[in-house]
Amino acid sequence: MFIRPFDYERAEHLADACDLLRAHGEAAKVIAGGQSLMALVNLGLAQPEVVIDISRAAGYRDCVAADGYLTVGALTTHARLASDPVAARCQPLLGAAAGQIGNARVRSRGTLGGSLAHSDPAAELPLVMVALGASYELTDGRQTRVARAEEFHLGFLTTQLADDELITAVSVPVLGPGWGWGFEEFSRRDGDFALAAAAVLVRIADGIIVESRVAVGAVGDRPVRLADVEISLSGAAPADAAARVGPLRGIRPVGDAGASADYRAHLCRVLVTRAIAQASARSLEAA
Amino acid sequence: MTATITTTLTVNGRQICKAAPAHLSLLRWLRDVAGVTDPKYGCGEGICGSCTVLLDGEPVSSCLVLAAQADGAAITTASGLLEPDGSLGRLQRAFHVTHAAQCGYCTPGMLMAAAAALAGSQRLSRQEIRARLHGNLCRCTGYGPIVDAIELAQDEAADDRGK
Ligand SMILES: Cc1cc2nc3c(=O)[nH]c(=O)nc-3n(C[C@H](O)[C@H](O)[C@H](O)COP(=O)(O)OP(=O)(O)OC[C@H]3O[C@@H](n4cnc5c(N)ncnc54)[C@H](O)[C@@H]3O)c2cc1C
């Protein structure tokens, strides 16, 4: 544990953290839950000269539903998201995904904003945000803008965030009437990052799937929506859905020490069909 | 901007206020600054669980939290599980009885994961106890005796409540 010493700044407000980021430039890193950053620091992979702590900033920890959208503050921990009653009622996919992250200690500290900003391709939260068509509220302390989840995640640990920008909140549409959701992931051991993961939403009317959203994670450099699968599901009876899912053309899995590319592609297809079945069952229950 | 920061933590009921380099993790602050050496450095990545402590009652990897981030918090480590008279607490006794420690390196973290698991009111099955230990690695025992210990402590606590 040979850590290069760094200075510490505590931001009382997120806007202060943006000012500090501008003041210190490239040498500075924001810390929220620390569940990604501290591991990188301990391993010597990140060597910030200044660490700006936003974990104690006021606010940004609520799950609020209004006008058909659920808005979750960026400092909301994974544990809170997994157990929040408003989130569970309005968009249960979020809590289901958050509850699968790492272990209990990671969920105690890790935050929504941190997970999205870190943008690990295997992370659960970016995946469900892409599936849900989430929008991220960003601020540089002076101006705010909105980024769409599908455009925000650019690749491995890479996002649209400018150097002085922070995520303040995330909005997702409330689960509409008749919609069902499914979430499936596979990892070697519980708590490991997923080898592949799938998030699915479907709406069934008169016994057929009329709308769907299908996204997968951990099989490329970012989570992706599978438009071809969504099109093929349209008009299918839930029982025929699995047969309609052909080879997944939207993914380019890479092989690594965890799994070969072929195995990941196979796994991904299996998880997508299971998540469709889950979502269909929930949609039928909801009807 | 500060390279040295004063942090106040209530560690196992005792308030400790110390100035230290700002880049210290909670783990290093506890061990090297406050002299509380129960939590152990294992992996530095939050995977092994040997540095687990309770921060305001929640289990955390103390290697992945800056001490400065925890300023003002209550920290519980394995010695915080002792009875007021200094004898072994219920969980510690149970670990002793079932031989749940071999080399002992994971034990302080295991105890805190166990304490967090048993903090809720609902009774945990063996399977649920195992699930609560995901993220705490033991390379000696094969986990069986550790699950036995937690079950034993849970049963004893239930007996006490029944009395
Ligand atoms: C053992 C272990 C297992 C894990 N397993 C999983 C897993 O299975 N799935 C998973 O998804 N994740 C997993 N994680 C990562 C975890 O989810 C992290 O909590 C998350 O990636 C980062 O959130 P954080 O709040 O801890 O961010 P930090 O570590 O504090 O920061 C991460 C990055 O995000 C930036 N950042 C933080 N907050 C903001 C913000 N509001 N706006 C802009 N930038 C910000 C920081 O500057 C930094 O670059 C695991 C971590 C560990 C230690």
Image (tube, rainbow, N blue to C red):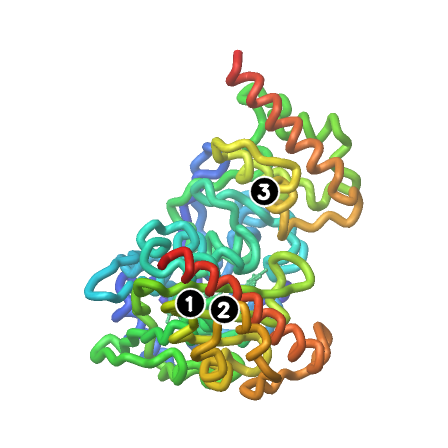
Q: Are marks 2 and 1 in contact (CB under 8 Å)?
A: yes
- Left or right of A144: which side holds A224? right
Quick one: label 3, few (<14), some, or many (20+) residues within 10 Å? many
Residue A136 % position (x, y): 32, 74
Residue B76 % position (x, y): 51, 38
**Residue A261 location, quadrant:** bottom right
Q: Quadrant of the N terminus of chain A?
A: bottom right
Q: Tell me the chain of label 2.
A: A
Residue drawn at point x = 42 percent, y = 75 percent = A212
- Left or right of A4: which side holds A94? left
Residue A20 % position (x, y): 32, 74
Residue placed under numbered mark 1 in the picture: A207
Residue placed under numbered mark 2 in the picture: A238
- Left or right of A24: which side holds A191? right
Q: Is residue A63 above or below residue B75?
A: below
- Left or right of B21: which side holds A194? right
- From the viewer's perspective, is the residue at label 2 or at label 1 nearer? 1
- Outermost residue, top direction? B163
Q: Is residue B144 above or below residue A13?
A: above
